[in-house]
Image (cartoon, rainbow, N blue to C red):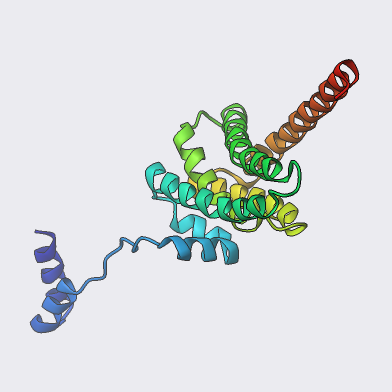
Amino acid sequence: MEDKRQYKLLLAQGVPSGNASTSVITAPSSNPKPMKILDIIISLLKDPQSTMRRLKDETVTSAGTYFLILAGIMFIPFGLLAGLGLSLRGFAPAMIVIYLIEVIGWLFFVFLVNAVLCIIDRPYGLSQTLSTAFYAVTPLAVLGWIPLIGSFSVFWALFLMKCGLQERQDIPEKKAFIAVVVPAVIFIFVFFLVLLNIIFVHQLFSQIFNF
């Protein structure tokens, strides 16, 4: 029915019947083609804002699959470094612990972001924020294992998270900035608090049991 209406409209505008038929049949599709994993990684690193906009309609299942692949990619260098360092006491466990801290820490950060969004804007489904975070973690997964560059990749991931909140969830820029910075500060505070407690407990037990 819709094609017939378009056909009649083109005829009324003076378009020949053959061309009108072709115009209706060959009308371009408005649905963009899904992006491949490698395309997403490269595009997010090169042009984060437009890429996040293209990923707006992706489901949490697709984003979760992407995240699992990234987690696997991230584990490869950590696993190799841990394997090479088996002869060094405590090196391999340390690499595994760092890997787990990055994965679990990022998920904890996402919960904080979603909580802040509910406070400063309006209630959001956790699945929306999770799917955005699954894409935003890309720099941390690809570059996080490299010394010095890994530290920079954390800030890059935070910037991607801000872009994702703006482009995928239509959150104003200022609120997106607050929703990322506040949880980041809380996370850093909690991390160092836990770290200091671990050091204190270790020293206490070392003195008591003469480790």
Q: Horizontal and vertical percent for residue 150?
A: 71, 55
In front of the other: 23 or 66: 66
In front of the other: 69 or 139: 69
Question: How many numbered callouts?
Answer: 0
**Is residue 203 visible in the rendered structure shown here?**
yes
125 sits to left or right of 89: left
Image point 88% across, 15% down: which residue?
208
Q: Horizontal and vertical percent for residue 200?
A: 86, 23
Q: Is residue 202 above or below residue 24?
A: above
Image point 82% across, 24% down: which residue?
202
206 sits to left or right of 147: right
Q: Is residue 145 above or below residue 23?
A: above
**Residue furthest top in the image:** 208
Q: Horizontal and vertical percent for residue 110?
A: 58, 36
**Residue furthest right in the image:** 207
In front of the other: 161 or 142: 142
Q: Tell me the quadrant of the picture where the N terminus can be found.
A: bottom left
In front of the other: 128 or 153: 153
Q: Tell me the quadrant of the picture where the C terminus can be found.
A: top right
Image point 46% across, 39% down: which residue?
128
Q: Horizontal and vertical percent for residue 28?
A: 26, 70
**Is residue 170 visible in the rendered structure shown here?**
no
Q: Is residue 18 above or below residue 160?
A: below
Quadrant location of residue 118? Answer: top right
76 sits to left or right of 28: right
Image point 58% across, 49% down: which residue?
137
